[in-house]
Amino acid sequence: MAETTQIDTSEKARIGAPADQEKVAIDGFTEEGENLSPFNAGSEQHGLKKHSHGDAPVIPEASRGERLKSYKLADFAPLTGREEDWRFTPLKRLRGLHDQPLTGTGPEVRVSGASNIRVETVDRTDARVGTASIPEDRVAAAAWEAFTEATVVTIPAETEADCEVTIAITGTDETPAAQHLIIHAEKFSKAVVVLDHQGKTTLAQNVEMIIDDGAQLTVVSVQEWDDDAVHASSQQARIGRDARFKHVVVSLGGDLVRLTPSSRFTAPGSEVEMYGLYFADAGQHLEQRLLVDHAVPNCKSRVTYKGALQGQDAHTVWVGDVLIRKEAEGTDTYETNRNLLLTDGTRSDSVPNLEIETGLIEGAGHASATGRFDDEHLFYLMARGIDEKTARRLVVRGFLNEVIQQIKVPVLEERLTEAVERELAAGNL
């Protein structure tokens, strides 16, 4: 698979690859950010900026950090499909999440796991509601206005490792509905929380994740819905000082699944890892639009999403936004997306975006690759007596296993491995 990256390999600074070096200034940047003055030397045009992958001038969009956020649905215009955030999404298949009242019965929520966790059902006036997120699109705002109760799961302060919590979310109603969840990891706690989505639904969902100072939280969101389910989920995390947050997305089931995870640093010294695995079958639309917001100094982020597609009109979308604000000196970030096309008739859209407002960073970059099987890998396996069908399955397993093994919940890892095997068998691969 051909790969494209943005990398400056100069000796003083490397933008485009992780770096373990002292903070340095980057050519073309000042402490105020990139110099985009139309009077600079080069082929920049007044009011226009060259695209990072070519010479064609384009009109730049507003900063990712300046996009509209509001709790009010009326502040978001009706969708047309031409909006940047929605241009890949088939609006007709949202089944009214964007333009109808969300009056249905949301999926049932059941929480199990460690005995010391606190589980509460609160109304929308609870002080914790809205702590970690503000809706950034019309569907999330619709869900915000429609929900009446929120489920709050709290990991008490200083909870030790091996705290595993499962939030089973089971849908039984296809009428458009809203849901609100809050996961709060208090100071110096350690936990793994699994959001296990199953059943049938038409759901607009907001998930808030609050990671207090020194906490270590892993959230695994599994979308293994019935074939006709529709799910749009905004999953936003607020990360405190010296905290560690891992977010893992696994999307396998559903007709249309659209997740918008975001991680926002609020204090220095924190680290974020965001992983994703998706396997799209014929006619299925699986979309991930994520944001890492470096708003404070000396934080680190890594993003790795992998997808496989098979069958006519299988469609996946991955848009990865990383924003490094002016104040975020010492940032170290890298994001990558890889997609494996298993059959003809599939489509994968991959758009990595990197916005840098300060040159005083450790390293930043992105990579995207989409392609078919690597013939050399297949030849290597077949030359050792493995038939082509088995060799293809081995390549896919190895490709996706990097994400599965990040979950660190053996029972769930085994279940997802078996689910991938069923996907491969269904495609006669």
Image (cartoon, grey):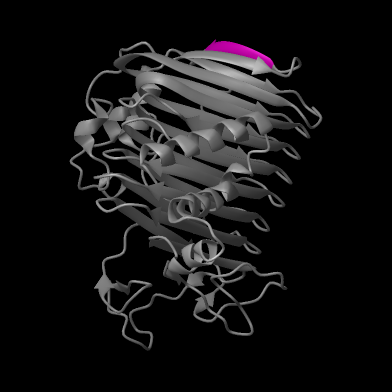
Which residue occupies the foreground of this view, 345 or 62? 345
Residue shown at the point (72%, 73%) measured from the top left: 22
Residue 26's place in the image compared with 318, above or below, is: below
**Residue 155 falls inside the magenta stretch:** no
On the rendered image, what quadrant is the N terminus found in?
bottom left
Quarter location, residue 329: bottom right
Magenta stretch, residue numbers: 118-122
Q: Residue furthest bottom?
A: 41
In the picture, measured across the screen, residue 274 lies left or right of residue 373, that is right
Residue at the spot 35% in from the left edge and 20% down from the top edge? 201
Left or right placement of residue 186 versus residue 56 in this view: right
Residue 120 included in the magenta stretch of the image: yes
Position of residue 150 measured from the top left corner of the image (x, y, whole percent): 51, 16
Q: Main secondary structure of the magenta part?
A: strand
| Whole-percent x, y for residue 20 in the image | 71, 69
How many numbered dots are placed on residues in this image? 0
Vertical placement of residue 209 versus 375, above or below: above
Residue 323 in percent (x, y) is at 49, 56
* Residue closest to the eye, 136 or 195: 195
Which sits in the foreground, 205 or 129? 205
Q: Nearer the viewer, residue 100 or 93?
A: 93
Q: Position of residue 134 (x, y in %)?
A: 45, 34
Residue 29 shows in this picture? yes
Q: Is 278 positioned to the left or the right of 163 in the image?
A: left
347 w.r.t. 204: above or below: below
User: Is there any visible trace of residue 357 in the rendered image?
Assistant: no
